[in-house]
Amino acid sequence: MKLSCSQFELNTALQLVSRAVSNRPTHPVLANVLLAADEVTGKLRLTGFDLSLGIQTSIPASIESSGAITLPAKLFGEIVSKLSNDSPLLLTTDESCQQVELTSKSSTYQVRGMLADDFPDLPLVESGTSLKLNPLLLSSAIKSTLFASSTDDAKQLLTGVNLTFDGYGIESAATDGHRLAVLNLTNILCNSKDNDIASEIDKFSITLPSKSLREVEKFLSTCDINQPINFFIDKGQVVFISVDDIITIRALEGSYPNYSQLLPETFENVLEFDRKEFIASLERIAVLADQHNNVIKVTTDSTANLIKISTDAQDIGTGFESLPISFKGESFQIAFNVRYLLDGLKVIDSNFIKLSCNAPTTPAVFSPVDSDSNFTYLVMPIQIRN
C-alpha cells in the first residue's frame, strides 16, 4: 500500500472511527483501526469495530498501490494529530503489511500493526427493512430519550433506547426504572415514495445500546440535514449510512418492557408553568439538594396559584423557591430527585410545561404545552416521611 492524503482529513477520519474502538478489547486487533486503500476508487477507507458498534468512513487519497493494514488506534491517531497539515502525508506499508511508514515534511514515523485479514468484517445488512430517514428528526428521537436509559449493565435492556417504527413515524423510549422518556415523531420518512413503502411495512421494534446511540447522535450532528440517512435493519443488526460514512450497531436481545402501562390515563391535578423559570429555580435549589440525596419537594398552593420548591440538606442548610402557576386540582406535596427533573425538562421543546399527577406516591408526568412536540416524561416521586 502506498498513498498520500491530507493530514486534516486523515485526522478527522481517525477521530470518528476511533469512537468504535474498545478501551478493553477482547482481541488485540480490536484495539486497531483498519486502513484499506483502493486505487480504483481513489479512496482510503478507515474502520473501527468493537463487535457491537462499528464506524466506517472514507477520505480521498492519491493512491499508487492498493493495500490494507490495521494500526493501533490510539497511538496512530496521536501521531497523525500532531503532524503538520501544511503538506500531504505519505503512507507506505512494508512487504509483510504489518508496518506503516508515515512521512510528513521532515517527520518520519514507523508504526507496527497487524494483518488486515485478522480484522473482523463489518456486518452489513443485505436484506430486511430499508428506509430513508430525516437526520434532524432521527437525532431528536435519540437526544430526547437517551438520557433516561439506565447505566446499570445488570439491567440489560434498560441500558438501551427502544425504537418502534409504525407506519410513517417512530416512537423512541427509554427508562431506567425510575423515569421514562417517550417521544413520538411523524413524517420522519424523507419522501412520498418512502411513505408508500412504509404503509406496507409491519410494525417493528428494536432496542439499541445507549453507548452506541451516543455515537450515532454525534454522527448525525455532522450530517447534511437535507440529505436522508439510509436506515437498514435485519436480524438484530442496524446500519446507518450517510454518503461515505457507515455506522453499524448490534441490537440488544429481548423484549423491551411495556412502558405504556405506566402512564396514567387520567389526572386529578394539572399544573402549568414557565419551563425556563422552573429550570432556573431547580438549578439554584439543586446547589443545596445535591448535598443531601438530591431530594426536593414541590408544594402547591391553589389559593395563591403558586408552587413552593424546597430542600432541606441536613446540617448544611435549607432553600425555598416560589413560582407562579396555573393550577387545577387539590393542594398537595410531592418529592423528586432534582437531577431527574432537570434532565427531562431541558429536552422539552416548549416555553410552557405541565405537570400532571394524582397523588404524591403515583407517577408524575411532564409534557409540553402548546407545542408540536409529542414528548412525555414520567418521573416516579420519592416517598417522604412527615
Image: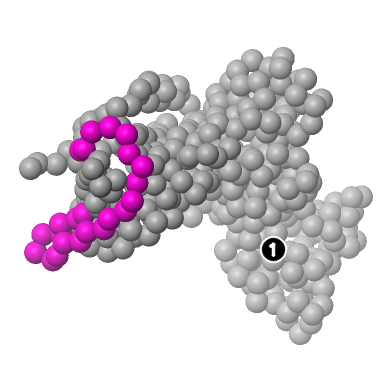
- Left or right, 306 with respect to 163, comes to left
Q: Quadrant of residue 320?
A: bottom left
Q: Quadrant of residue 122?
A: top right
For the point 45% across and 35% down, the residue is 376
Residue 326 is inside the magenta segment: yes
> Is label 1 in a helix, a strand or a loop?
helix
Residue 199 percent location from the top left of the image: 71, 17
Q: How many C-alpha atoms fall within 10 Å of the one at disc 1: few (<14), some, or many (≥20)?
A: some
Say what amino acid the circle numbered 1 marks: Thr
* Secondary structure mostly taken by the magenta-highlighted segment of the chain: strand
Magenta-highlighted residues: 310-332
Residue 318 is inside the magenta segment: yes
- Left or right, 378 with respect to 77, comes to left
Work out which quarter of the rendered image holds the C terminus and state it.
top left
- Left or right, 104 with respect to 167, comes to right
| In the foreground, 231 or 51 | 231
Residue 372 percent location from the top left of the image: 58, 37
For the point 42% across and 50% down, the residue is 274
Work out which quarter of the rendered image holds the N terminus and state it.
bottom right
Q: Which residue is mark 1?
A: 12
Would residue 206 be visible to someone looking at this image? yes
Instruction: Residue at the far front: name it.
Output: 303
For the point 35% across and 22% down, the residue is 266
Q: Is residue 378 above or below residue 275?
A: above
| In the foreground, 137 or 89 | 137
Would residue 294 be visible to someone looking at this image? no
For the point 76% across and 85% down, the residue is 106
Q: Is residue 349 above or below residue 182?
A: below
